[in-house]
Image: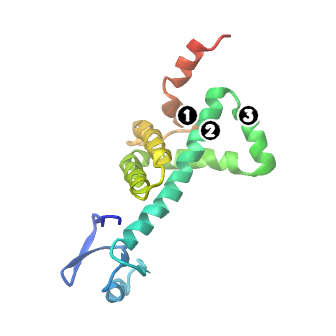
Amino acid sequence: MMRQRRSAFLVPFGGLLLAAAQITAGAQQREFRPLFDGTLAEPIVVEGPPGAASALKMCYAAWTKGRTAMLLGVRALAKAEGVDGALAAEWERSLPGLHEDSEKASVRVSPKAWRWEGEMQEIAAAFEAAGLPGGFHHAAAELYAAMAVFKDGGAEDFQAVMDAVLGDAVLEKAKTDPI
């Protein structure tokens, strides 16, 4: 069972603390809705035992932030292997717009991606606790950690993101590969 996580924005309610935009689960979940009347926040009620809402939030982040990390990693590998142009052509043929979307997403998340390193580790641990492999999200954490250089302003362009993610990897590969 997932442990409950608390948000930085908490509202007291009947001896409980609720996040301002809480996904809730448990016996008193229906009573939480009135707390959000007249606000822009919409509470999402998850049927299930305590921990179900945390599990949903974890799964949602695993996909949304994990998907971005996957694109980032795939693009970095393609650049490192010298096949980024060929990948762009294949994606344009089979998945139109993905190449451009991957560049936009990488730049868009660059100023905040460093914060996701810990979250990716938590997600990996949740996968492992459920008997599933957590390696992908451990790798996502490493990719996002490499983007910490952008936390004070974000990347200017996609090449800056690639430079940060690839770091010395390309230089090391160049030393070992014959010309």
Colour theme: rainbow
Task: Judge by depth and name the residue closer to the eye, 19 or 158.
Answer: 19
Task: Give me the C-alpha separation between circle 2 and circle 1.
Answer: 8 Å
SS category of the residue bearing label 1: helix
Q: Which residue is mark 2?
A: 75
- Dot 2 surroundings within 10 Å: few (below 14), some, or many (20 or more)? many
Residue 145 quadrant: top left
Q: Amino acid at mark 2?
A: Arg
Q: Amino acid at mark 1?
A: Met
SS category of the residue bearing label 3: helix
Q: Is residue 172 above or below residue 44?
A: above
- Residue 20, position in %: x, y? 33, 73
Of the numbered discs 2 and 1, the one sitting upstream in the chain is 2
Evaluate if marks 2 and 3 touch, with contact meaning CB atoms under 8 Å apart. Answer: no
- Dot 1 surroundings within 10 Å: few (below 14), some, or many (20 or more)? many
SS category of the residue bearing label 2: helix
Task: Judge by depth and name the residue closer to the eye, 98 or 50.
Answer: 50
Evaluate if marks 2 and 1 touch, with contact meaning CB atoms under 8 Å apart. Answer: yes
- Residue 111, position in %: x, y? 44, 46
Position of 164 with respect to 79 (left or right) is: left
Residue 81 quadrant: top right
- Residue 59, position in %: x, y? 47, 62
Q: Indicate which disc residue 85 carries.
A: 3
Q: Residue at 72% x, 51% y: name it.
A: 97
Of the numbered discs 3 and 1, the one sitting upstream in the chain is 3
Q: Amino acid at mark 3?
A: Gly
